[in-house]
Image: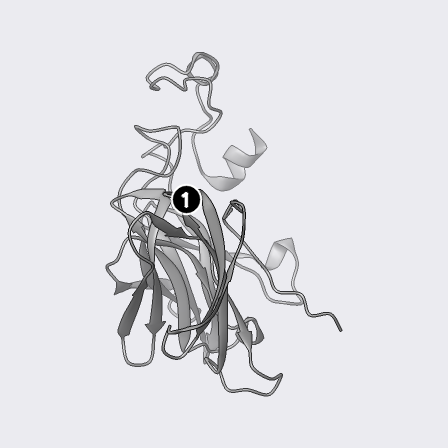
């Protein structure tokens, strides 16, 4: 109730919540889309506290993952994968419209948020060069998905956000990639000067490959053929030995 009061949202109907009325098949799922709930972004200074949070209204949507964010003058630039809604008619997983890459610019002076579509591909699991977290990033990498089904990625996308160009890399029939991770060639390498690493599952053999791609071109550098399937999961990280 306190969250509802603070968040300016309606208190959920407990009977509907308990019975799952109106939900398909998976009726006991604890979450459900409510078109009457507002959506907003909260911004807190790095050295701030609860009292310093500012709220900015946006159109209702759902976000699992962000590509990156950074300060630009008196604005905050936030690149996200935006789902139009979530768990409305399908409670078994993300399948409520194609998620697309968008840029939200929060103007701290005017108190407004502008929204710009960066790429129309249905996509998820965005990544950047981890050295650019909290800083301006030019390149981003994500997985293109089949129709609306986040569980079935089909190709790798590379976004150049300075030129608004996107290139793709396919992996062949019956092959699904997992999330790819960027690792620079050296600690001082330029952004995008490195490799992308990820697992690709071949449904026809039920085995996986660990693939290393040139981040600049998406060409294959090396492939490690594994004798078994490695679940591609949804996230990965590279940990150096030293």
Q: Residue at x 32, y 38 (%)?
A: 95
Please tell me which residue lies in front, 91 or 202: 202
Question: Where 95 falls versus 174 (above or below)?
Answer: above
In the rendered image, the quadrant that contains the N terminus is: top right
Res 41 quadrant in image: bottom left
**Is residue 134 at all visible to an observer of this figure?**
no
**Is residue 242 at all visible to an observer of this figure?**
yes
In the rendered image, the quadrant that contains the C terminus is: bottom right
Label total for image: 1
Where does label 1 land, which residue?
Answer: 205
Q: Residue 70 appears at what percent x and percent y?
A: 49, 72
Res 151 quadrant in image: top left
Please tell me which residue lies in front, 181 or 56: 181
Please tell me which residue lies in front, 158 or 210: 210
Q: Residue at x 39, y 61 (%)?
A: 142
Q: Residue at x 65, y 63 (%)?
A: 48
Question: Where 23 falls versus 5 (above or below)?
Answer: above
Question: Where 88 falls versus 193 (above or below)?
Answer: above
Give the colour scheme shown. one colour
Q: Residue 56 appears at what percent x and percent y?
A: 42, 56
Q: Residue at x 50, y 87 (%)?
A: 190
* Disc 1 crowd, CA 10 A, few/some/many (<14, 14-19, 20+): few
Q: Residue 88 appears at what percent x and percent y?
A: 33, 30
Secondary structure category for the residue under label 1: loop
Please tell me which residue lies in front, 81 or 142: 142
Q: Residue 195 appears at what percent x and percent y?
A: 50, 74
């Amino acid at each position: 109730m306190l969250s509802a009061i603070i968040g300016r949202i309606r208190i959920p109907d407990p009977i509907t919540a308990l019975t799952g009325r109106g939900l398909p098949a998976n009726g006991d799922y604890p979450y459900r889309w409510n078109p009457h709930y507002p959506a907003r972004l909260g911004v807190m200074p790095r050295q701030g506290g609860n009292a310093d949070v500012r709220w900015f209204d946006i159109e209702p949507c759902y976000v699992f993952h962000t590509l990156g964010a950074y300060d630009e003058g008196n604005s905050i630039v936030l690149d996200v994968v935006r789902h139009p809604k979530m768990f409305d008619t399908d409670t078994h997983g993300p399948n409520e419209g194609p998620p697309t890459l968008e840029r939200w610019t929060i103007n701290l002076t005017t108190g407004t948020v502008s929204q710009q579509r960066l790429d129309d591909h249905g996509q998820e699991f965005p990544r950047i060069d981890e050295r650019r977290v909290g800083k301006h990033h030019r390149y981003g990498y994500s997985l293109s998905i089949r129709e609306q089904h986040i569980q079935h990625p089909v190709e790798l996308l590379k976004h150049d956000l300075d030129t608004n160009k996107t290139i793709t890399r396919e992996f062949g029939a019956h092959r699904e990639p997992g999330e790819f991770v960027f690792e620079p060639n050296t600690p001082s390498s330029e952004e995008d000067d490195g490799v992308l690493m990820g697992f690709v599952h071949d449904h026809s053999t039920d085995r996986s490959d660990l693939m290393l791609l040139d981040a600049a071109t998406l060409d294959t550098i090396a492939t490690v053929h594994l004798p078994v399937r490695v679940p591609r999961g949804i996230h990965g990280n590279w940990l150096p030995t030293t």
